[in-house]
Amino acid sequence: MTRMPFPHTRFSRLCPALFLILLLAAAGGDRGLAQEPETLLAAVAGDTLFLPGQGRITGVAWVGPDTLAFLEAVPSNVSGSGRREVRLVFQDRFGSILLEEDFTGVLDRTLAYDGEFLWSCGDVADGSSLIYKLRVDTLQVEGAFDLPGHRPVGMCYDGSHLWVGDRDSGRLDRFDPETETVTRTVVSPGFSPCGLAWDGRSMWLTDSGTGLLYRLSGSRKSWSATVSPEAFLHRGEDILLLHDGFSLWYVPENQQLAIRLIFQ
């Protein structure tokens, strides 16, 4: 159906693999353990990119090699209107603001770019969610389409489809921009999927329940590796992801910056 809207506790004695198993057992029971790959990836934090603003970053995506777009939810005690505001902000790699647009009452979280259009999500009064299609040049809403879940948090574009992570249902939905429908659903390795990013070959996923960073591979987006908990562990946090064509970046919850991950 289509709707058109208006314009660290220490665990030093545990090896990383055992630590990962204990986390997954506590988080998801046998579902996660049955799929667990043996590959653990090492990584360190690299340089950072400042995201200027006063609110919480709820969506982020590269729009070209030198332009970053992000959604900023400004709390009511800071916003000029006295209510929670949502702004779509464009900046360059140096942190200079290029453009800001108010999308309060329409967009709420997630952001992805398919090379032509921006995509984002918003909530409806009945508790459902919509995925919005926006023109980059005019920022006009071209369409709004129903999503099966009600708490989308992360989104990315894999070259042909959009993937949306629904935190409450623990699944990833594949949205086809051509048919404007969800055409596949994949169960997440964790149970509270958040950030999503596509690196050209694999999809990366953060999970607020386990606090881990996963790599998903192949057409079925199967769980193929996990970043070592010693390198990445943010349990209870909504960590957003983005990829600039060369590196994977993550945005810590309630922080105005993106951090580049360097895999070793």
Image (spheres, grey):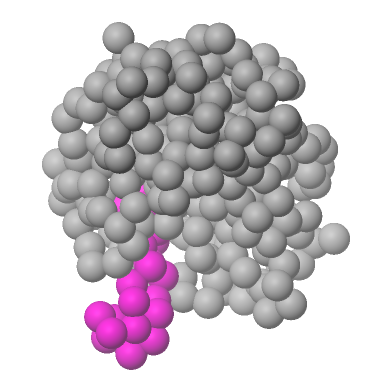
- The residue located at (39%, 76%) in the rendering is 85
Viewer-nearest residue: 252 or 91: 252
Q: Quadrant of the N terminus?
A: bottom right
The residue at the far front in this view is 13
Viewer-nearest residue: 234 or 258: 234
* Residue 238 makes an appearance in the image: no
Residue numbers of the magenta segment: 64-90
- The residue located at (53%, 30%) in the rendering is 22
Please state the horizontal and vertical placement of residue 64, each as a whole percent of the image: 37, 34
Q: Quadrant of the C terminus?
A: top left
Displayed quadrant of residue 14: top left
Please state the horizontal and vertical placement of residue 109, each as a whole percent of the image: 50, 59
On whether residue 258 falls in the magenta region, the answer is no
Please state the horizontal and vertical placement of residue 54, each as a whole percent of the image: 23, 67
- The residue located at (62%, 76%) in the rendering is 6
Q: Does residue 93 lie above or below 134 as drawn?
A: above
* Residue 106 makes an appearance in the image: yes
100 relative to 108 in the view: left or right = left
Displayed quadrant of residue 231: top left
On whether residue 76 falls in the magenta region, the answer is yes
109 relative to 180 in the view: left or right = left
